[in-house]
Amino acid sequence: MAELKYDKTGRLLFTKEMKKEYTLLIPQMLPDHFAMLVSIFRGEGYQVEMLDNTGRPVIDAGQKYVHNDACYPAILVIGQLINAIQSGKYDPHKVALVITQTGGGCRASNYIHLLRKALEKAGLSFVPVISVNLSGLESNPGFKLSLNLLRKAVFAIIYGDLIMNAAHQVRPYEVTPGAADAAVSACMDFLLKDMDAGKGMTFKSMRANFDRIIEAFKAVPVTGEQKVLVGVVGEIYVKYAPLGNNNLCDFLLAEGAEPVVPGLIDFILFKINNREVDVGIYGGKWVKEVFCRWLQKYVMKYQHAMIDALKNSGRFRAPGDFHDLHSYISGYLGDGNKMGEGWLLTAEMLELINTGVPNIVCTQPFGCLPNHIVGKGMIRKIKDDYPWSNVVAIDYDPGATRINQENRIKLMLANARALAKEQRARTLDPEEGPSGEPVSAR
Ligand code: SF4
């Protein structure tokens, strides 16, 4: 059995011996994206499992071991990890926990310390915690983020974004219930098989896989109706994790709407861009600025390929690229506004409104100051500029009742349907916004 080793500060390390014996537990956020990341880590010799425990026991574990003034994603992520260890499914002496550290000024850089404190309280301080970060914050002898692994992670994120995007555009209209989910599974199957065989990781093969994904979703028979489009934005965890947002996308589907969820790759590009911008605003090494600019360009090459696949499909709407998204914040927020989701959250709302999705759910976790500013805090200004926008901010926390959240979303949907009816009656001039104002006047 691997011996427990500590660094000079007393931090328990994940050692090379542990890599052979331990299973890494990863909290869940985006099921398809993370399934591919798990496969990539397995290919690098790690034993990894993505957690799927959910519901009240997870929230209870989070509340028991994390201070109740921590932001809600911290409570859920730590609750899911601790609940998994206590479930009896794993040998607590043979697991290590994986958690990200963003390296920014927000609490996401410090969840790891809250997790270690929680483990101590739960009598599990012998469980190693591995930080996944790109800022050199913590390292472990048994865990390395190699360039090759990061390159593959970008592939997984792009594949995941394309699948998520196409599935959301098909699922509300499928003739046979479950057909879109079957297309997701089929795509995941061939991608995971490719990844296990070390394939699908070149630009050329990725483009071929994009075509396969598009064809899989185009093959799903759909009805011809048009449902109300509803954008989903917010803090990254509650925006994506069904556990964090009480299965928001399923609820929107059940209410007869089509969820429009921006991809994860823009968040990654936002984080890279922040590091480049930091040098200009606060100073720093030019090498860092040049590297981040190069990295952004590299990742955007893949983003453009994904956008082209959607555009060329002749069937699906395609999002704009990161530069398009960034351009929307002019006159709203500066680049230095980057705590939490920073300007990205506002930009996503503006992009949705400008691309025909004025109905938006802005998901807000309890205890998240930065995203209340760039989310809820911007709604007034957006409403002034786009009077027809229909944005509802929904708070998520352990005490918020689901029924209350859902009633507020239902009210937003009622407004959305009234707006759509008004638009149809008006037979808009293409140069006019839904309110009748000329676009050029805004
Ligand atoms: S952005 Fe909000 S939810 Fe995320 S770490 Fe910061 S305070 Fe917590």
Image (tube, rainbow, N blue to C red):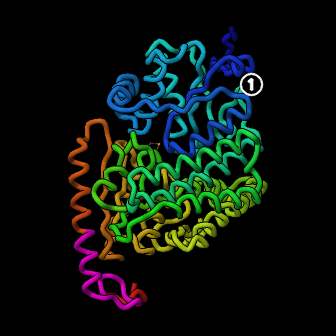
Question: Which residue is at 63% across, 17% downward?
Answer: 10
Q: Is residue 417 magenta?
A: yes
Q: Position of residue 312 (x, y in %)?
A: 61, 72
Q: Nearer the viewer, residue 136 or 83?
A: 83
Q: Position of residue 226 (x, y in %)?
A: 35, 71
Q: Amino acid at mark 1?
A: Pro
Which of the 4 image quarters holds residue 48?
top right
317 left or right, relative to 9: left
Q: Is the C terminus in the top left, top right, bottom left or bottom right quadrant? A: bottom left
Which of the 4 image quarters holds residue 323?
bottom right
Q: Is mark 1 within 8 Å of ligand 1?
A: no
How busy is the neighbourhood of tag 1: few (under 14 within 10 Å), some, or many (20 plus)? Answer: few
Question: Which residue is at 23% across, 41% downward?
Answer: 401
Question: Which residue is at 56% across, 70% downward?
Answer: 320
Secondary structure of the residue carrying numbered label 1: loop
Q: Nearer the viewer, residue 427 or 59?
A: 427
Quadrant containing ligand 1 = top left
Which of the 4 image quarters holds residue 34?
top right
Q: Is residue 279 visible?
A: no
Q: Is residue 330 magenta?
A: no
Seen in the picture, residue 433 relative to 217 is either above or below; the reply is below
Q: How many discs appear?
A: 1
Question: Which residue is at 35% across, 27% downward?
Answer: 63
Q: Which residues are magenta?
A: 416-436
Q: Position of residue 371 (x, y in %)?
A: 41, 52
Q: Position of residue 54 (x, y in %)?
A: 39, 32
Q: Is the N terminus in the top left, top right, bottom left or bottom right quadrant? A: top right
Q: Which residue is mark 1?
A: 141
